[in-house]
Image: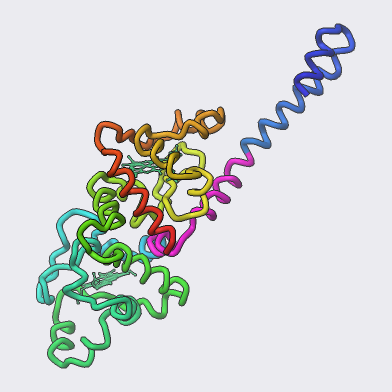
Amino acid sequence: MGCLAGVLIATGRVAIVPRKLFAVALAAFLVAAVLALPVLRRLLSSWESNPVLRGRLVAERSGCFNCHLAISGDEIPNPGSRWGSVPRFAAGNAMMYVDGRQDIEEFIRFGAPRSWMSDAGVRERLATQHLRMPGYEDRLSEDEIRDLVTYVEAIENPALPGALPGDSAAAGRELAKRHGCLACHGVEGSGGLPNPGSLGGFIPGFVGRNFGDLVQDKAEFREWVLDGESSRLGANPLLRFFWRRQQISMPAYRQRLTSAEVDSLWLWVAWIRDR
Ligand code: HEC
Ligand code: HEC
């Protein structure tokens, strides 16, 4: 279109109509592009979706974090309860309260596991302690409960492929925690945390469908981690535009991670993707 208008402009009078047409078409294109952005964002977020991310969103809108502080901060005091405070997810607390997925599910459904409820002493404590875990069975759908259990399980007990020394996936996860990857890329790389001004409006994770578009192979993963970008995607002017204006950028880890450490991170990412 631009080319056609250009040729006509160069040839003089004939140009007037196509030039107007060109301006109208250009304006229409820009309006369409602006309108398309929210649609594109919705599409990208639906591709990012996975049980852990959906579970986190259910937890947010269900008020779980009002009582369970998610990552850091002091726990809320809870006089009279077993350990004296409301447990924080992801702080190694789970082992004091739950023994597997079933218990997590019973906490969410009934506010305590059945084994607690069948013990008269525990029932009495629950009746007198200051804060109690509310049961959500009537408020949440079965799908929501399943995602929520998966989220809590992922954040509290990622059940890594064995704590064997030298296990590279486990070492990769430790690195991901230590270097803050999980803080930006979400619990177990589940993604979807806000990033104002970016193309999708969120930070992509490592498990959703977007990952395959952003990271084609191990070499590209290495580039992202060491340089904070991918040269293949950087060649796209639209993506560069969003990279410049997004609020949070991927840091370059070249000075901080060795080549072997990037390999461990890659093995961990491959392992969570397999699950
Ligand atoms: C009113 C505060 C409150 C809210 C809201 C709340 N909980 Fe709890 N939760 C507690 C308390 C208190 C305990 C510890 C059990 C006890 O001491 O009785 C607990 C325990 C748990 C446990 C077992 C401990 C652990 O860390 O594994 C899980 C799982 C849990 N809650 C999940 C959730 C989820 C998911 C939500 C949102 C759907 C939620 N809670 C909302 C107060 C709350
Ligand atoms: C300060 C937040 C932040 C931290 C910390 C961070 N990243 Fe990123 N990362 C981003 C952002 C934002 C993008 C998206 C880049 C884009 O689309 O422009 C990204 C992109 C990526 C990508 C490619 C896109 C995808 O699907 O995720 C990979 C792989 C990646 N990061 C791995 C890591 C690893 C491994 C670590 C830890 C060593 C890490 N990141 C730490 C913010 C962060």
Q: Is residue 68 above or below residue 37?
A: below
Q: Main secondary structure of the magenta part?
A: helix
Residue found at x 43% / y 44%: 218
Is 90 colored magenta in this rendering? no
Q: Quadrant of residue 17?
A: top right
Which residue appears at 38% of the width and 53% of the height? Answer: 269
Q: Quadrant of the N terminus?
A: top right
Is residue 68 depicted above or below 104 in this figure? above
Q: Is residue 123 left or right of residue 210?
A: left
Q: 125 or 18: which is nearer to us?
A: 18
Number of numbered tags placed on the structure image: 0
> Residue 183, image x and y in percent?
30, 48
Q: Nearer the viewer, residue 14 or 99?
A: 99
Which part of the image, by quadrant, shows the C terminus?
bottom left
Furthest-right residue in view? 14
Which residue is rendered at x = 59% and y = 41% of the image? 37
Q: Is residue 58 left or right of residue 31?
A: left
- Range of residues picked out in magenta: 35-56
Relative vertical location of residue 192 with respect to residue 220 in this rendering, above or below = below
Q: At which x and y percent is residue 222? A: 39, 39
